[in-house]
Amino acid sequence: MTSILYIHGLNSAPTSTKASQLLRLAEHCGIARHLRVPALHHHPRQAIAQLQAAIAELGRPLLVGSSLGGYYATHLAEQHGLNALLINPAVRPHRLFDGRETPQTNHYSGETWLLTHDHVQALAELEVPAPQDGQRYRVWLQTADETLDYRQAEAFYAGCTLDIQEGGDHSYQGFAGRLPEILELAGFDRAIWQDFDFSAL
C-alpha cells in the first residue's frame, strides 16, 4: 500500500512547517488517509513504540524523517527494510549529550520536560551501522544547517543518494517545492497533484 509516515524532530510537532505543508497537500490530493504524522513523545522508547504502531497500520510506508526523526527513520528502515527520505538528519544524537540533564520545551505545544541520562541511553540503543543498502535512502542536506553539522550526515550516508544544497538552514528551506518528489518516492500517481499551487504553501 502506498503511504507515508512523517517523523518530526526533537521538540517539534505535527504543526511544524514541513509537517503542515505535507498534511495540506495530502488533503488536497485526497490521500490524507495514507499519511500519518504522529505527535511523538519526547522519550525515544515511547516515540519508537508510536512509530512501530504506525508502520503496522500503514503496511510499508515511505519514512520521511527530519532531524532526530531522521535518526528514528534510519533505525526503522533498517529494522523493516523500508525506504526512507531523511531531511537534515541527526547522526548519533546521543553523542551530542554533554552529560548535563537539561530542561526542554516543545516549540509548538509548549510542553516542558527534562532531558535525562535515560533519554540518552534510549537514543544510543537505536544506533545502527551506516546503511549498506543505500538505494533505499534519499538524504537531503543543507550546508548552513545551524543545528547539526551536515558533514556528519554526508559521511554516514555516503553510500546513499545524497542531495546537498548550499545554504539553507536546519528547517530545510524550499521544502514545499520538493513535495512532489516525496509523493513520487512514495509511489503516488503524479496526476493527483498536477493542479496544485505549491507556492500557496
Image (spheres, rainbow, N blue to C red):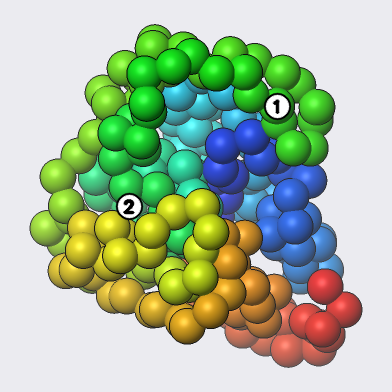
Q: Nearer the viewer, residue 21 or 96?
A: 96
Q: Image height check: is 134 above or below 20? A: below
Q: Position of residue 80 (x, y in %)?
A: 28, 42
- The residue that disc 1 covers is 105
Residue 97 horizontal side relative to residue 80, left or right: right
Q: Local crowd at mark 2 within 10 Å, few (<14), some, or many (≥20)?
A: some
Image height check: is 119 above or below 18? above
Residue, x 74% and y 50% (percent of image)?
16
Q: Is label 2 in a helix, a strand or a loop?
A: loop
Above or below residue 137? Residue 15 is above
- Which residue, given by chain and number where applicable, does mark 2 sit on? 82
Out of 69 and 64, give the one closest to the viewer: 69
Residue appearing at x 36%, y 36% in the figure: 96
Under circle 1, the secondary element is strand
Mark 1 crowd level (few <14, some 14–19, many ≥20, 10 Å Cα): some
Q: Are marks 1 and 2 in contact (CB under 8 Å)?
A: no
Question: Quarter of the image containing the C terminus?
Answer: bottom right
Q: Is residue 32 visible?
A: no
Counting from the top left corner in percent of width and height, residue 39 is at: 67, 33
Tell me, yes or no, if residue 155 can be seen here.
yes
| Mark 1–mark 2 distance (CA, rounded to whole Å) | 31 Å
Q: Relative to the observer, which residue lies in front, 2 or 144? A: 144
In this rendering, position of residue 121 left or right of residue 143: left
Q: Residue 137: where, in percent of width, then height? A: 31, 64
Task: Tell which circle, 1 or 2, labels the residue nearer the N-terminal end.
Answer: 2
Quarter location, residue 20: bottom right
Point out residue 200 in the picture as x, y percentages from the top left corner: 87, 79
Q: Which amino acid type is marked by label 1?
A: Thr
**Residue at 48% over, 14% down:** 101
